[in-house]
Amino acid sequence: MIWLALDTVWRLFLIQGSRNGRTIDGLGFFHVMAPLVRRLARGGQDRADAASRHAGYFNCNPLMASYIAGALTRMELDSAGSGEIDPHRVERVRDTMSAALTARGDYFVEMTLLLVSLTTGSIFAIYTWYAGPVVFLALYNLYNFRLRIGGYRTGLHLGEGTGRALVTRLLKEQRLLGATAAFSAGVLAALLMVRAWRYGGPRIAAAGAVLATAAYFARGRISPLKTAFLLLLAAGVFLALW
């Protein structure tokens, strides 16, 4: 069992390596499940049947795919004794969990985790340039490794109940990280205004206030990540032409 887990977990980091327009990450997910297929079926028709259950279309947030891989592995191992497993049940569990975890996972990673990591890293970068990237990578990869490796372990433990448990936990952590992101963004904005006033005078600070106001009114129309990127681009152009 340990060797099966080890042979599976490292593949989770490569799940998007074969992305295509037909099956999205289906080939990458099959590569993740290949050690299980080899263990359950020694050859012939049994191996073909096992492979077909985990091949095909797969579209899920890559950090959340580990939970699905773990849950399906548990289903397969539990059914190995009887020698029978319903392929439609496997497909139903995979598709249901993918739909639920994609929506929740995309928002958690892109709208919450990335914002916390970027704003916190930017605060440290103001004072020590090399500390910013280190802090950003440390915060982001803390969840990256936790979700990929810990997610597979959770899926093995909970099986089909993984999706409900994960969504509940993500909602709690999302509220905490959302509050942290708001706080760090406020601290970053205050530091930038102070340093703009100190090094560029009131005109630079006024320009920053205008950009911040524009971002506030545009928050309902474009995503936070796009807003941050446009603000960074506008600030760079402004400073270059000033």
Image (tube, rainbow, N blue to C red):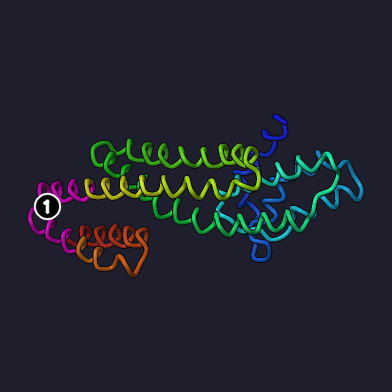
Residue at the left extreme of this rendering = 202
Is 160 positioned to the left or the right of 137 in the image? Answer: right
Tag count: 1
Q: Amino acid at mark 1?
A: Gly
Image quarter for residue 154? Answer: top right
Q: In the rendered view of the protein, which quadrant contains the C terminus?
A: bottom left
- Residue 140 image offset from top left, x and y in percent: 43, 42
Please tell me which residue is depicted at 67% across the width and 54% down the height of the picture. Answer: 93
- Residue 108 image offset from top left, x and y in percent: 44, 52
43 up-or-down from 104: above or below? above
Q: In this picture, which residue range is highlighted in magenta?
A: 188-210
Q: Disc 1 on helix, strand or loop? A: helix
Please tell me which residue is depicted at 9% across the width and 59% down the height of the picture. Answer: 203
Residue 203 magenta: yes
Residue at the right extreme of this rendering = 44
Is 83 positioned to the left or the right of 234 in the image? Answer: right
Please tell me which residue is depicted at 11% across the width and 52% down the height of the picture. Answer: 200
Q: Which residue bears the numbered disc 1?
A: 200
Image quarter for residue 99? Answer: bottom right
Residue at the top extreme of this rendering = 2
Residue 117 magenta: no
